[in-house]
Every structure is written in structure tokens, then in C-alpha cells.
Amino acid sequence: MLDSRYLFHWAKSEGFVKDMVARATGANYPAVSDKTVKTSLIPLPPLAEQERIADTLDKADALRRKDQKLLQKYDELAQSIFNEMFGDPKHNLKGWDILPFGNLIHGIKAGTSLGGEDRELLPGEFGVLKISAVTSGVFKQEEYKVPVQSEIVKEKVTVKKDDLLFSRANTRELVGAVAIAEDSYPNLMLPDKLWRIDLDPAQLRKYYCRAILTDKNIRYHLTKTATGTSGSMLNISMGKLKDLEIPVPPIELQEEFDALSKRILVQKQLLEKSSVQSSSLFTSLLSSYFS
């Protein structure tokens, strides 16, 4: 009566998930019983049709997963190049100078705390970025919300080409995320949880800076200074970031790394678009079969 792969995809559909969330009980640890699951209604076409639907969804899911794996390969390539050129920052066997981060920058600029709604910007409106605009390591200009325009009273810190953006607040896994804006977005503002870091170009280049701030050992030293009683949201202070000591290779070597990193990032951005499309296709198919 029921194809197991068809059942698997139905259990991931938005309708089933929403139904389970709505019927879950328990404040601290919401759960559903097996009885609740068994009473769910599943659309049940003939077995041959179920198998056809499952085949289509399997292929769409495989495409989505392939894009995600390729994105991971680009990150691994960038990390491999970094290790080859600069070595492990933890041991600094190449003997680079170690300097406080604050000595290598001109300043840090914070945005403004504003609420907002998820919708498209209208002409003349300003949007405020979400933290998710930088958490992947690639700047995502579509990750914004639209505040009440009359509430925008402070100086607007908008996104400019080549801005190095840093997330000062997030979960332990994501706090300290860094991304570089490849274009200017004069209608997008920084929130208070995102900082723009203005580097001293004579000492530090942006792609090297992005790489060193996301190195696992550097991140360990940075995140252990983060404050917050909840594991879901930690904060890094501006002072702690400036005190962070990092290795500083010769600027010529940083420039070489920047050139390689930019080429990798361009390819990764193209793949990001493909990944979004393959994910949207899979979601759309799920919705069409199980709505």
C-alpha cells in the first residue's frame, strides 16, 4: 500500500511538519506521541504513482545534496591553500609576527538595532541586514528585514563594496562569522550585531583577515572570551576582538592569497546560486506533491 521512500519524503513536507508542531505538547520539550503520528492523513495515490513521485524527489534531493557537497569542497580548497602558504596559526612555525588585531585596523563600526518584517524592499526604503547575511562566510544581500522607516533616526551604516563584516553575536558555532561584500548596497544597513571592520591596508588584507578570523584555533581563542548566559546567543566585545593576537605574514604574501581567494569565492558564489535553485526546486516539488 505504501512506498517507504514516498513516506520518507512526505514526513519532510511542510504540511506534515506544521501539523506535528501544532499538535505537539510540552512547554520545555515539545513532543508528539506515536498515536498523533498514526492519525495524520497522508495523500495515497496508487503504488506505481507513489514510486514515480519518490523517484522524482530522490533525484531532486540528490541534486540539492551534490551542490551542498561541492560548496564544502570549495571551503576545503581555500583552507588547503591557506595552510600551504601560512602554516598552522596555532604553532606559527613560519615565524610570522604576532600582533593584537586592534593594531592592524583603523576602526570598527557598529550598526543600529532595529526590528522589521520579512518582505521585499519598496523603492526608497532601507532594509536592515540579518545576522544570517554573513553566517555562511559569503555575503547574502537577500538576508534582510524591513524596519518601520520612521524609526530610522540614527546614522545609517550602509554596506559598501569590499566591506569586511563581522558577526559579534550568535550561537557558539556561528558567532564571529566573517563575510566580504563584493558590491555596494546603499539601501541595506548594518544591525547592531554586525560590525564593519576597517583594515589598515598596509598591514592586513581582507581575504587573509577573513581566513585568519575563521581559523579554528583563532576562533577558539576568540569564542572562549564571548559572554552570555545562554548557549543560543553569545556576544564578543569590541575590546576582546581588538586584543585578539594573530599572525601577520608579509603583505605581499597576503596579496597573493587574496587573489587566489577571490577567484575561489567567485566560483563559490555561482555555486551558491545553483544550490539555492536546487533547494527551491526540491521544496517546490515537495509542496506540489503533498500540499
Image: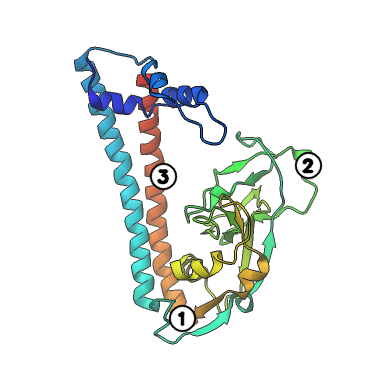
Q: Secondary structure at mark 3?
A: helix
Amino acid on which the number 3 mark rests in the picture? Lys
The percent position of residue 270, horizontal first and vertical second, equals 39, 49
What residue is shown with label 3? 273
Image-based side of 88 in relation to 191, left or right: left
Q: Secondary structure at mark 1?
A: helix
Amino acid on which the number 2 mark rests in the picture? Glu
**Crowding near the residue tagged with mark 3, few <14, some 14–19, many ≥20 C-alpha atoms within 10 Å:** few
Q: Earlier in the sequence, mark 3 or mark 2?
A: 2
Image-based side of 110 in relation to 167, left or right: right
C-alpha span from label 3 to label 2: 33 Å
Picture residue at 54% right of the left edge, 48% below the top: 132
Task: Work out which quarter of the rendered image holds the C terminus and state it.
Answer: top left
Picture residue at 33% right of the left edge, 40% below the top: 64
In the rendered view, would you say 2 is above or below 128?
A: above
Q: Secondary structure at mark 2?
A: helix
In the rendered view, would you say 180 is above or below 96?
A: above
**Crowding near the residue tagged with mark 1, few <14, some 14–19, many ≥20 C-alpha atoms within 10 Å:** few
In the rendered view, would you say 133 is above or below 277?
A: below
For the residues labelled 3 and 2, say whether their Cβ atoms are less than 8 Å apart.
Answer: no
What residue is shown with label 1? 252
Marks 3 and 2: which is nearer the front?
2
Q: Earlier in the sequence, mark 3 or mark 1?
A: 1
Picture residue at 54% right of the left edge, 43% below the top: 142
Residue closest to the eye, 267 or 75: 75
What residue is shown with label 2? 151
Can residue 291 be seen here? The reply is no
Can residue 6 be seen here? The reply is yes
Residue closest to the eye, 220 or 266: 220
Task: Work out which quarter of the rendered image holds the N terminus and state it.
Answer: top left
C-alpha span from label 2 to label 1: 45 Å
